[in-house]
Amino acid sequence: MLRMSKRIRVISALALLNFSIATRAAFCEDSNNRLRQRIDRLEAGVRAEESIRAVKRLQNTYSHYLEFGLWTDLTDLFTEDAVGQFQNTVITGKISLRNYFMEQAGRTSPGLADNQLNSHLILQPILTLGADGKTAKGAWHEITLLGKFGTSASWLGGVYENEYALENGVWKISRLRFLQQYSGAYDEYGHKAPPKWDIPYHFEAAHVGVTIPQSALQSPVAPSSAPATVRIARIAQHVQQLNDETEVQNLQHSYGYYMDRKMWDDVADLFAEDGLFEVGQRGVYVGKTHIRRALEVFYGAPPLRNGELFDHINLATVVTIAPDGRSAGARTSQLSMLGLNGEYARWEEGTYENEFTKQNGAWKIKAVHYYPRMATDYDKGWARDAKPAPAANKDFPPDRPPTQAYESYPKIYYVAFHFANPVTGRPVQYPSGAVTRVQIVKQSASRTAPAAAGNLNPDAMVAKLEHRLDSAIGVDAVENLNSSYGYYIDESAWDEMADTFATTGSKEITGAGVYVGRDRIRKVLNLRGPRGGRTPDFFTIHQLTQPVIHISEDGNSAKARLRLFQCGGNSDGSSGSWIGGIYENTALKENGEWKFGVQDLHHIFNASYRNGWARFGAAAPPKAKVVIPPNQPITGRDMPGGGIQQGLGGAASPNRFATEFPPDRPIRSKQYAFPQIVEPAFHYKNPVTGRMPGELLP
């Protein structure tokens, strides 16, 4: 019996051991399955976010190609059977589209003619990936400057509602739909617009803070036999690239914001110690100290003078991260509104092809190369005035001569691209004529296979990558959210606008105050009524661009700085306005979707189209009848007035609903101070040195 009991105990112990081993094996298998599923989801998420970035790159590249008449490369961005819809014209097939673009520009050969301006500036994207991750839709604003020196100058603006398709792993434009909103000759009083637009927007207010649907984030990936650590390392490369793109774009756009306020110390801070600065034909300045001095010599000492406008609007930025992850390039269009009240006003438009370097984990500017495309006196416009590219300064000579010869409008010099055609992967095909040289940056997709993730805990690595990918996705989703505000206010779509706010969100109402809570926001917006936006005889275009977006550490909130570039007025073109400002908004993640938290607008200026920003307030023409010299025609610049004098909703006196429905608190920043200079606050410190701004928002 004792011997039998011992045998039973041994058998029981072996059974227990086998059970333990089997349980442990099952647990390990289950754990491995969970890890594999998380890696699969990560790969699907990376693929989806890279699709959003690829579509954005595709559309921004479209505008750069169109500006310089690069018809072959432009056509390559489309599918073979692409459809183009322009007002009442429908074009089918990429070759027919090429012919249409050339015809619209009055060209029968590659490139543009001397004396020709064909600037198509796009901004304010709202992108939505299709449920299967293989299609996408995108809304964009475009403002177009057209003309021929000595002959004509005109504006045209509208909205793109485009469709995109993934073909053989490459994104292309499958449907281009442009819906014109306004147009007009430069010398008129304002822009002309139809009584209504009927734009079929693809997005919904309740979900505009989402770029990627859950189905695309969970779409199946191809089975992989690679070890988990290798897959994780590969994903880490892609996620790092996405976050690097955001950091470089933030850096480029911050450069523009610091330029606006003549914050020369902050501008110089953005450069590497041996950084280069080259504008037009001024020559090359080397090192932060010389760059800081050159900025002050060229543009004047800080701060801005009373009545000075010095806005540098960045648009259509295309960032390319090099395979080594330590260098990058960025191409950006810039539209500048420059002047001094009572003295002068000027438009400038040009292209940046900048270089960046990553040092000790921080991105810095390696070189600024700015090529001014056009500069003109505000009163004359680009049909009658064209200023040459700036030459070297005798008071502070450059460290090196200009890198190359370059001439601006009315001459045609093609600004080369640092990146290949995003569809074909081939170098850009330039027309015959002068082309600048730029530093070429290869696409990051050419990276070699990464090494395994080593001894790091795979679960911990995956958790970190999930968080970082979520932040990258959040950047584009928050831009979607902010872009939607402009479209909804243009349409007086108050209920839709209210739906974009979090339950605890707050919104400024010009001339009244700040309203807190979605229900109160909805009520005050509807009290404001259609006079704040679109009517048959009045229109306004709220265009937002130049985002600097930061997602919080916990991933549940974000801060975003964007620029307001607004035009509008009477639909018959008898009166128009230019309005500029800075949004410093916050966003909250509510039920997995991004919603507005705080909306904070700092108005920089408000000027009539007729008189511009050099004839404001005391410097404006007198209201009495203007005496015109004999034989000189009266033009829009000679007559006083016009424009939206206090902006939407009014600012000179409280709105009626401020009494009927009092706000929860006053507006933070002073509104419509121009020509007085009031510095806007920043939500972030200098991205390179951490230098504090004059006012840092909480």
Image (cartoon, rainbow, N blue to C red):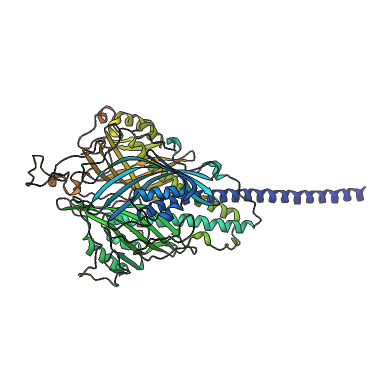
Give the left or right position of residue 127, taking residue 377 as reference.
right
Q: Position of residue 262 (x, y in %)?
A: 25, 57
Q: Residue at x 37, y 52 (%)?
A: 66
Q: Can residue 227 be seen from the camera position used here?
A: yes
Q: Position of residue 487 (x, y in %)?
A: 36, 39
Give the left or right position of residue 295, taking residue 455 as reference.
left
Give the left or right position of residue 96, taking residue 282 as reference.
right
Nearest the camera: 194 or 641? Answer: 194
Q: Can residue 475 be seen from the camera position used here?
A: no
| Above/below status of 175 relative to 225 | above
| Above/below status of 510 relative to 111 | above
Residue most extreme to the top: 660
Give the left or right position of residue 501, taking residue 19 as reference.
left
Nearest the camera: 682 or 275? Answer: 275
| Above/below status of 357 relative to 143 | below
| Above/below status of 642 relative to 523 | below
Number of labels in the image equals 0
Quarter of the image for residue 539 reads top left
Quarter of the image for residue 365 reads bottom left
Q: Residue at x 77, y 48 (%)?
A: 19
Residue most extreme to the right: 1
Nearest the camera: 334 or 174? Answer: 174
Q: Position of residue 321 (x, y in %)?
A: 46, 60
Q: Residue at x 34, y 29 (%)?
A: 523
Residue most extreme to the front: 108
Q: Position of residue 65 (x, y in %)?
A: 39, 54
